[in-house]
Image (spheres, grey):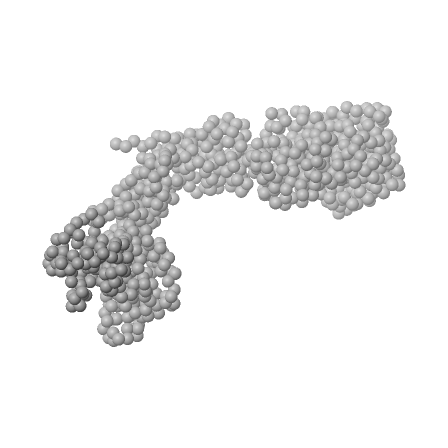
Amino acid sequence: MTQAGYVGASSSITVDDVPALYEGAKFYSPAVGDANKSSINSWLAGLLDRNGPVPLLKVEGVPPETPCVSVCVLGSGSAMADLPPAGDEFELAVRQIERLQRVSFGAVYPLAAATISALVAVVTAAQLKVPLLDADGMGRAFALIHHTAMHLSGVSPTPLAAVGPTGESVLVEVPAGPRADRMLRANVDTVGGWAALAAYPTTAGVLRRAALPGTVSRIANVGRLLLDRTDPDLLVTRLGAITGCRRLARGRIAELEHLSRPSDVTIPAHPSSLVVDEIGGLGRQLRIELRSEIVAVFADGALIAGAPDLMCLLDVSRGALATLDSLEPGDVIDVLVTPADAVWYSPRGIEMVGMGSHGIPLAHPRRR
Amino acid sequence: MRHPSTLPITLGELARIQPLAGAETHLADPARKVEQVVLAETFERLRRCTPHVLVVLHDEAATGGWSLASALHLAWERNLSAVVVSRAVAGGSSVALAERLNMSLIVIDEDPIDLALQLAGQVSAPAAARALRQARLAELLAEQTGIRGVLGVLNRELQQVPVALVMGGVVIAGQSAALTERPQVRQIEVEVHAPGERSAARLVAAVPVPGPAAVDQVESLLRLARPSLQAAWALSRLDAATRAAHEQAAFGLLRRLAGEPTPSEPAEIEAPSWASELGWQVGEANRAVWLAPVRPSGEPAPEITFLVRASWQRGHTTWPLVAEGDGWISWHSAADPDDVSALRRALATFRESAVAHRLVIGVGRAHAGVGGLMRSVAEARLAAHVAREDGPGAVQWFDQVGANAALAWLPTTEIAQVADLCLEDLMAARDRAALVQTVLAVLDAGGSLSQASQQLGVHRNTVLARLARARQFGLTFEEPGQRLALHVLCYALASLWSDATPDADGH
């Protein structure tokens, strides 16, 4: 068990870590609202209370032949709030793959150590009574299930199983990873608007090179900083030490634009943008492009940050992260940018999750 | 033979002709030249643009707010002249960013490709584009029937170049900023002869150099306005002449009406209906105003009447202005006889014109009805005579004049001629001015020598000595039979000599 406010390495996840995990997971997926907060937190806290802490192991600390599987929530978070999980969806999804592959998974890892997916990985590990790996496939949240470091390393997402809150399930096997997302999207609505996904069954040895290490303990640490409500300037400095994030600018929201423009069909989102007048500094006009997340920040028309950078907004008056659905003209916000894991700046990574995938054909500022 | 200018066309000129004339323009600098038009489909194309290019965004380069922001930034980096984009993409924040970067932004409703082609044609043939602009201006000018309308068109079309119509140093219409001399501004004048008129009016334009409009081009545009101006002038003069005659006749009738039936009860006469057709009001409290030249010289010329009317009726188009004798009558009718705020405001705004035309103003008291109006007119006229003492621009209210008004009517010139005949010795004396002044002071003081010496600022003995000398020349003012005549004579001579220049030795 760790002290409140403790920041550093930890070997297990306890009841006390749940709020920090939630906040940290939100930092890496700022578009997600708080609809599920209390139900998911109390569910996980109850599980940890009954089954005891979940061991959190480094990938190197697990024998290389150990079979591992990733879990995540597929579909919309608000659908999950409407139709809450019965509780056995994630366990069932893993069991389906176990039956198919005739293996017994020795560890679970989150597909993305962000959003609720980070928490359901802990839930699944607690239910299966196996350790959780301190690694994930994205290091933040991306839109599609093949936007992972494993996919870039040639690990197939399939066979995968998706179990809905209705108790129905879909088992998918495809030769080409990107096809899996298409097939799943078609089924998610039918099984209840969201589904528990178990995917990327592989071994710990493969994950040593294919997964992004340390990302689960990182969100716990970020979450503890965020829970310790403090002066925004101090918070940004502390976050910078852990995540490498920095403040691009502080400003006041001047305008919210909801324009219907041609949008990339592969990513389900409605583009809109946010205009912010910088306070102090050069008094620049910032334009923040929103899709399902913040995909680019322009200052006076010059691109200063863009996907796969992780950009989030900090509500200065509350000293807390601002979710994208809570913004209003007049709010004072800090625009923070956090570099994504290095793998996303490789040519293939940029091609997959860079600004081009959001319809912005400009060179990334880190690559110019 | 004048050659059309082959200088590159400027943004300001382009924005005045179709297809950009209908667009929403936010020009940072209308004087920016446009050397080339580029239809940019990609940001790559934008990056290859050279300075002084007008870029039309479409397709990938115009996909949303961010693309316009990015394009504006690139345009700023590349020193382009302007960015043209369709309305679907441009929001209020884009305009704010354009202003921040000092980059011209033009928002269009048309298809960007068609527009780019048209613009390219205009930019490659600047002379043709300018001719198009002149033709458009000529069309606009031809639609105008009033002087103000013509000047309005000129000032609208020649952005940043104020234009004024000036006659005898007075701005009749347009922006008076055209007359102020500033560095880096060249004034251009074009004479406009009103039909059958000796004195000419001038169209003056202040052209910033270097500026969006070439000097010779402004000049040709001003010349283009000349016929419309002459026509408008003739029309308004025709109107004005008719109206003046009409008003004069109507006022004459009104006066006869007041004088004829029962002069003892003038308030009972009602204002005839034709008076209100002229826009005149004759009501409870009529306060007349008499505008008169400082130096009357017979009936004023119709041109002066025209100018005085223009400035007097600015903002009070229903107030009459009737030429009468050597001046003009006007009046203001209100319910409350003590309400003079409107009149005071009108007098304040008219003051400048009064000085320019060397006029004085008399204001009568408020009286009811037509008879009262005539009485007020007489009072105003008296007051105006008194006002002459204070020079051009002076305003005299009859309330403050009283019986002294009688003095203003004295024919001082004629009385002085009498002095030449009756007091030959006095008029020949070198110190006649001092003698007359002293006698006048003593008479004004009711015979008190001490008061007179105080007023003159000389010793009592000096006053005594001067009186003795005056008596020798025939100024025997102690004799009761001559006292009034001599007092009047001295007043006339003193006021005549004080009007004349100090060093003039009599006349």
Q: Nearer the viewer, residue B302 or A323?
A: B302
The reply to whether residue B223 is in sight is yes
- Residue lying at 82% horizontally and 43% vertically, measured from the top left: A43
Q: Nearer the viewer, residue B71 or A198?
A: B71
Q: Nearer the viewer, residue B45 or B367?
A: B367
Quadrant where the N terminus of chain A sits is: top right
In the figure, B281 relative to B498: above or below?
Answer: below
- Residue lying at 76% horizontally and 25% vertically, measured from the top left: A210
Is B135 left or right of B56, judged from the image as shown? left
Residue found at the far front of this picture: B461
**Residue B76, percent from left and from top:** 51, 31
In the figure, A52 relative to A65: above or below?
Answer: below
**Residue B290, percent from left and from top:** 28, 60
Q: How many numbered discs?
A: 0
The reply to whether residue A196 is in sight is no
Quadrant where the C terminus of chain A sits is: top right
Quadrant of the image occupied by residue B417: bottom left
- Residue lying at 24% horizontally and 47% vertically, measured from the top left: B194
Is A148 left or right of B387, judged from the image as shown? right
Is A238 left or right of B239, judged from the image as shown? right
**Residue A173, percent from left and from top:** 77, 32
Quadrant of the image occupied by residue A232: top right
**Residue A157, percent from left and from top:** 76, 30
- Residue lying at 34% horizontally and 41% vertically, measured from the top left: B180
Q: Nearer the viewer, residue A131 or B28?
A: B28
Quadrant of the image occupied by residue B250: bottom left
